[in-house]
Image: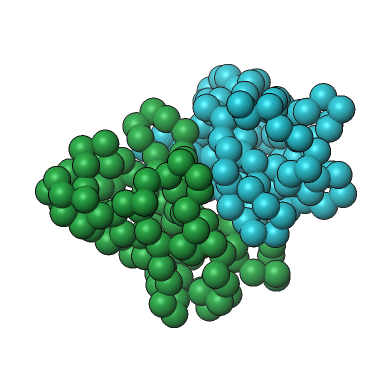
Amino acid sequence: QSALTQPASVSGSPGQSITISCTATSSDVGSYNLVSWYQQHPGKAPKLIIHEVSKRPSGVSNRFSGSKSGDTASLTISGLQAEDEADYYCCSYAGSNTFHVVFGGGTRVTV
Amino acid sequence: EAHLVESGGGLVQPGGSLRLSCEGSGFTFSSHWMTWVRQAPGKGLEWVANIRQDGSDNYYVDSVKGRFTISRDNAKNSLYLQMNSLRAEDTAVYYCARDGSSWLWYFDLWGRGTLVTVSS
């Protein structure tokens, strides 16, 4: 069982905004602002879209934004487009006891 | 442009071994932690292991400890994953990924992956 819980699916209409939650089930994981988000289209490699909770890499659309409150991180996609249909994974550092990294189970976004 | 290219995947019997390779180009390979992430068919991403820039430090997910070994050769811009005592549950696409910044634990460059199938 993942230490990060995501909804299995989220859907929205073009132009709408959606939010994907990522809740830490371990206090170690929730203590760190080292959450990243990845977009994965079918058959493709994951792509970094958010790091350190809310930072957006160069070239990533500003329609993607991240935030965190307590043990829950969130990814918001605004102005939903057909190309946003993909799987989205949150990821977090799991703490200095293990120096591990954990991924959430993934969320399928349907437009 | 930066790239990562994995190789070495294939079909192997349970209990067998396989060595994956990942070659980096277009960036200073020796400046980055490197990571292996896998994805079982139809499943989510799973972090497997990572290694410090000079190879002096590495970490593994519990399920592969004692069976997998991560290593690197900075002179060849290459990352490796030696996988021994393979099990059916190790079947997955294995991705090589670059850590974007030391100790910030995010992956800003990914390869296309190589498929490992463990089956008799």
Task: Establish if A47 lies above or below B16.
Answer: below
Specify whether residue A24 is in view: yes
Specify whether residue B60 is in view: no
Q: As drawn, is A16 to the left or to the right of B36?
A: left
| Between B70 and B34, the one nearer to me in the picture | B34
Q: Residue furthest left?
A: A13
Shade of chain A as shown in the rendered figure: green
Determine the residue positioned at 28% across, 42% down. A84
| Between A8 and B34, the one nearer to me in the picture | B34
Display coloring? by chain
| Between A43 and B17, the one nearer to me in the picture | A43
Determine the residue positioned at 54% across, 62% down. A52
Q: Position of residue B81 (x, y in %)?
A: 71, 34
| Between A68 and B45, the one nearer to me in the picture | A68
State which quadrant residue A82 falls in.
top left
Task: Establish if B74 lies above or below A106.
Answer: above
Q: Position of residue A57 (x, y in %)?
A: 51, 48
Q: As drawn, is A38 to the left or to the right of B111?
A: left
Q: Position of residue A77 (x, y in %)?
A: 29, 54
Q: Position of residue A99 (x, y in %)?
A: 69, 62
Q: How many marks?
A: 0
Q: As drawn, is B58 to the left or to the right of A14?
A: right
Determine the residue positioned at 69% across, 65% down. A98
Label the cyan chain with its letter.
B
Determine the residue positioned at 87% across, 49% down. B56
Task: Establish if B81 lies above or below A61.
Answer: above
Task: Establish if B34 lies above or below A106.
Answer: above
Q: As drawn, is A97 to the left or to the right of A26?
A: right
Image quarter where the N terminus of chain B lies is top right
